[in-house]
Image: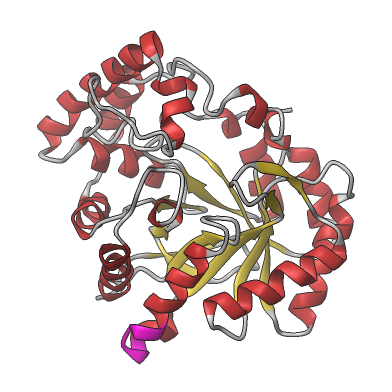
Amino acid sequence: MTLRTRNLGTTGPRVSALGLGCMGMSALYGDADRVESVATVHAALEAGVTLLDTGDFYGMGHNEMLIGEALRTAPPARREQALVSVKFGALRDPAGDWIGVDGRPAAVRNFAAYSLQRLGVDHIDVYRIARLDPQVPIEETVGAIAELVEKGYVRHVGLSEVGAETVRRAAATAPIADLQIEYSLLSRGIEQGILPTTRELGIGITAYGVLSRGLISGHFTRDRQLAANDFRAHSPRFQGDNLRHNLGLVDALREIAERKEATVAQIAIAWVLSRGEDIVPLVGARTRERLTEALGALDVTLDAADLAAVEEAVPADAAAGERYPAAQMALLDSER
């Protein structure tokens, strides 16, 4: 199959209009099924998805090895169409705790070497530091990635969760394909200053969290019990009154979805798709069933009346609770 495609900025690759975010197959959303995860990657490639997104710290390398396995066992034609986006720099200890960020040039080269090995590839298509290292100028980190581009180990430089000023400094150092950042009906902060800046500079957006970690998927319920190793058990938007308020927004979306003969998830994804051809949503499907549902969003057209109804149901800043706990919010250059 061939899906609609979009460009990652003016200098980046052309990719499927939806990408597959693979983090949940290894970490942060409770236990995952490795066999089903590999089958889901294969199904995505078969459906025409070309962009696979991972991080070297997802499961401390587990996710990269899983993607490597999926690519190795995929038909050659599907394997060749895959473009892999990798985040690096987040440091963890043996207990899985987060212990900082490292954006030093030597660390960039080291992280890349391990990722290439785990993925089983000779190059990474888009490479980006997951969070800005406050001790290292972005020019040094981006410059090190640019050197990897010159040597053929990386194809394109990306950014992740940085603010407009950092985007400008990075773009003055090397061509930037895209900025990966959270963007959804519940997280619209980029519309104020970041999105205008990326558009001015010809930088694309890969939007993660388009279903707010399942909160606006239409499948999350008030009585759902989350495992201790599920990030959402500690996420402000999934707690108490915040959860009740946010699921009320989902109920309003459900009415629109029923009129459109679509699911709530498809409406939420279609809304992100409608925000511009420079935006590529990443869907974090962990199963083939959820992948099929997400891909159905490409068949949902939201006209002006539909978009107005969505805006009325979920106005900007309607979400209750921050998108991360306070300690993690403090690490986000994009929130400063």
Q: In this view, does 320 lie above or below 130?
A: above
Judged from this view, the residue extending furthest toward the front is: 95
Looking at the picture, how far across and down is residue 201, in whole percent?
71, 52
Residue at left offset 29%, top offset 59%: 33
Along the line of sight, which residue is nearer the eye, 188 or 293?
Answer: 293
Quadrant of the image occupied by residue 69: bottom left
Q: Is residue 145 visible?
A: no
Q: Give the range drawn in magenta.
A: 72-77
Along the line of sight, which residue is nearer the eye, 43 or 62?
Answer: 62
Judged from this view, the residue extending furthest toward the top is: 241
Looking at the picture, how far across and down is residue 330, in whole percent?
71, 28
Image quarter of the N terminus: bottom left
Left or right placement of residue 282 versus residue 155 in this view: left
Quadrant of the image occupied by residue 172: bottom right
Left or right placement of residue 118 versus residue 281 in this view: right
Left or right placement of residue 74 versus residue 99 in this view: left
Looking at the picture, how far across and down is residue 150, in whole percent?
79, 81
Residue at left offset 26%, top offset 51%: 294
Q: Is residue 215 above or below residue 181?
A: above
Left or right placement of residue 178 versus residue 139 in this view: left
Looking at the picture, how far across and down is residue 122, in whole percent?
61, 86
Along the line of sight, which residue is nearer the eye, 230 or 281?
Answer: 230
Q: Can residue 166 be seen in this view?
A: yes
- Residue 293 among those drawn in magenta: no
